[in-house]
Image (cartoon, helix red, strand yellow):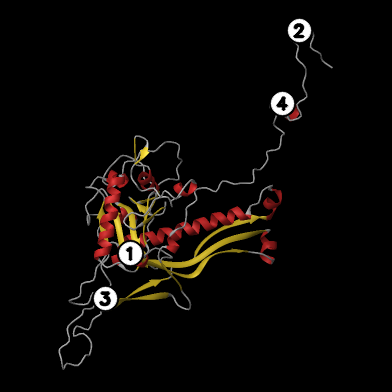
Amino acid sequence: MAQQNSGSSQLAQLTRPGALNGGTDPRALYLKLFSGEMFKGFQHNAIARDLVMKRTLKNGKSLQFIYTGHTKAEFHTPGNSIMGNSDGAPPVAEKTITCDDLLISSAFVYELDETLAHYELRGEISKKIGYALAQKYDRLIFRSIARGARAASPVSKTNFVEPGGTQIRVGTGNATNAYDASLLVAAFYDAAAALDEKGVSSDGRCAVLNPRQYYSLINTVSSGVITSGLINRDAQGTALQSGQGVVEIAGIKIFKSMNIPFFSTYGTKYGSASATNPGITSPTNVGSFVGEAVEDAAADVTGINNEYGEETEFANSCGLIFQKEGAGVVEAIGPQVQVTSGDVSVVYQGDVILGRMAMGADYLNPAACVELIAGAAVGSSGNAAF
């Protein structure tokens, strides 16, 4: 055994069981333990399903929604028969929502990979498939609400005026106003007043904002003290930061989502300020999966049977405020996961994990839809009615 003599620079020859063939890395052969978790990617919270009218579609391709317009009260003339109002009120119209083609997300899991892997694959893959379906679900509904805010009422009988949608400009034209907490609050009160004036129920009113807009609302501070008055004092800890911590503004409950159309992107848009960019500087190293462009989802796109608009039509959109009756979604097949088995698994030595759903969405009552815009005048190019 090598020994270190007094006054000698000789060191003990250590046995390093982790070194590969006596290499320089003493930990090369140590087991890389699995933590029990996998990176879940960019998870999007699905929130739209419970905020609009949802119906199940059975034995048909579309679902009909009936509108009734306003009627009036009149004084009775003694001796006259009562046979209904002379103007035939209330007027009636319909809105039809068609089911889009089957929406799927899938992955093939090779059996040998499952055998060799020291972590569970299928559960995480199923979650990712669920996230993909939920993301698409929210995006189509939010686009429908934006379209409703630019639409006239389906009731169009002569001599009857029914309220349509509403667009509210945040600030005075600068796109950066989209992140100004005080201007957002003012827009909320304008939206609430507009909904009241159009006779929209106060029950079920909500708003969906970009995450940075949401955090701007809860982070308005002066000398280190929150001064906006928008914090729910009963919400603490994670609840405060999760999108549920802001009190209602003008009776409108606030949510945050990366799935609203926001200056022709989803969620976030970095870059220099312009008429179509709020001018947020990237905090650097955020990666490339930020500000995904709004895709073309017009009715002429394969698989789409409703009209959801195109990218350029959301050039200045920066938030949605709506009541439950503003939009509807029909589901022929609810979100579900299927897995192959039996002979298929034998032939391919693995299984396909498939997530699927069949749904369609559209606006219902335009009067219940409000779109916030910034950086351009209401009704200008990119914001006009569809």
- Amino acid type of the residue tagged 1 in the rendering: Ser
- Amino acid type of the residue tagged 4 in the rendering: Gly
In the picture, the disc for residue 8 is 2
* Eye-nearest disc, 3 or 4: 3
Q: Is residue 211 above or below residue 299?
A: above
* Eye-nearest disc, 3 or 2: 3
Q: Residues within 10 Å of mark 1 (few under 14, many from 20)?
A: some
Q: Which residue is mark 1?
A: 202
The one of 354 and 96 positioned closer to us in this rendering: 96
Ranked by sequence position, the earlier of labels 1 and 2 is: 2
Q: Which residue is mark 4?
A: 23
* Eye-nearest disc, 1 or 4: 1
- Amino acid type of the residue tagged 2 in the rendering: Ser
The one of 18 and 87 positioned closer to us in this rendering: 87
Asked which quadrant contains residue 361, the reply is bottom left
106 horizontally vs 65: left or right? right
Q: Which residue is mark 3?
A: 69
> What residue occupies the far front of the structure in this picture?
234
